[in-house]
Amino acid sequence: MFVSDCININEKGHLTLGGCDTVSLAQEFGTPLYAFDEEQIRQNARAYKKSIDDNYGGNGLVLYASKAFCCKEMCRICNEEGLGLDVVSGGELYTAVSAGFPAKKIYFHGNNKTAAELTQALDAGVCRIIVDNLTELELLNKIAEEKGVTADILMRIKPGIDAHTHDFIRTGQIDSKFGFALETGEAMQAVKAAISYKNINLAGLHCHIGSQIFELSPFELAAKVMLKFYADIKNETGVELDELDLGGGFGIKYLESDEPIEYSEYMKSVASTVKECCSELGVKVPFILIEPGRSIVGSAGLTLYTVGAVKTIPGIRTYVSVDGGMGDNPRYILYQSSYEILCANKANEERSLTATIAGKCCESGDLIQENAPVQQVEAGDILAVLSTGAYNYSMASNYNRIPRPAAVTVRDGKAKLIIKRESYENLTENDI
Ligand SMILES: *Cc1c(COP(=O)(O)O)cnc(C)c1O
């Protein structure tokens, strides 16, 4: 009925999430509010884990790409579910470590890590650093040498695959700021350099071909391209790599028309592709890593807003303004992302109004959605924007000095505050 499986409607006609009435959540915690169905997050994590167990003999690890939604509680949930963590900055690494996440299951990504971040990663004892470029490789070797340690790395490769998604979130092709290109020989040169460095241990390679991908074929193709490269490396250098990180990017449902692949299907076909390629090419079957971010948290989260002004411009459109906007959800202004939107306190009513949901920032582009079907709403109603668990809180800003919303998890009808609402004091605390 809805794009998200964890949504329901109760006897009052109110939208529910994880057994909680969302209208009550709005009253108790205020709006805007991010709410996450904890059970759904855990089920998603388990589905990925099971797919590796069932199809690949458990010879792999699921890393949650924490950039999708990073806070201490999310790190704790991932740890409890046996996931590893993909972090892309010193801040995400700090969050994970402060939450007690075991460093030996943290993988550190990023295309321009600073010396301070590389030092932080080595000091924390992260499992792997995913090296993006030669400057970083050299710098990491130097820092590791000074510390008298060996840095275990993967290297990021651009497999040259176009995964048919939005331009901003497509990363596998040659014209990308991420990683080493295969076609130009750059990747092989980098592999040789990594092997030659004394304080570097090259464990394997990584690729990430994009985000919000609905097809299996680009993932299979990426695995093939990568393993062919493993064979080339073996032939040219004699080195056999043990690990293959295939990245994330699994699509989720934002609209009814979206058709994501089953996560279990993903590993089924990729595992058989990997095994076939390895036997054809005569290379070791590698330990596999996958890095889902959006598909772990996206559909499990929603955002609640209170409706303010409703402005109908005759013959043009109706603007419904809410008490948040591009600050808490910058995905519409960035990517014109689609969302399903419902009036939480009129969830049983027909969505007979076509409205443009606007934020409260001083910016005409500050919209949540244009011409979306919603119930006949008025000031004081609660609007729920579905599937906002990923890349909303994590991309939020304080534009217009609007404090970032609070976040709660809900489970078995109970809500738990996991991120406090920012205060005006928080906004000015670093001002001098
Ligand atoms: C963003 C990213 C992911 C997660 O992508 P999703 O689309 O959220 O699954 C995984 N790995 C890397 C390296 C990324 O940059």
Image: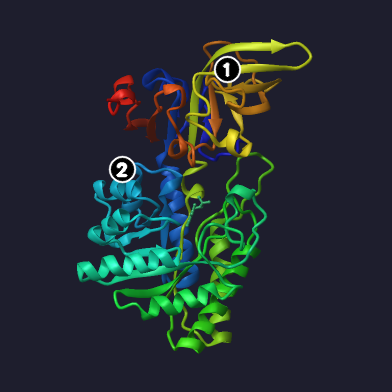
The residue drawn where x is 33% and y is 70% is 152
Q: What is the x, y in percent for residue 77? A: 34, 47
Look at 45% across and 34% down and name the residue there. 396
Question: Quarter holding the N terminus?
Answer: top right
State the quadrant of the C terminus.
Answer: top left
Q: Residue 286 lies in what quarter of the image? A: bottom left
Query: Residue 180 location, x and y as percent?
Result: 52, 67
Query: Viewer-proximal residue, 379 or 89?
Result: 89
Foreground pick, 221 / 89? 89
List x then y, in percent, for residue 221. 62, 69
What kind of element bears circle 2? helix
Q: Is residue 180 above or below residue 412?
A: below
How far apart are the alpha carbons under marks 1 and 2? 32 Å
Q: Amino acid at mark 2?
A: Lys
Check disc 2 and report the residue beneath it.
72
The residue sitting at 31% across, 54% down in the picture is 117
Label number found at residue 321: 1
Q: Nearer the viewer, residue 123 or 107?
A: 123
* Residue 290, percent from left and from top: 47, 62
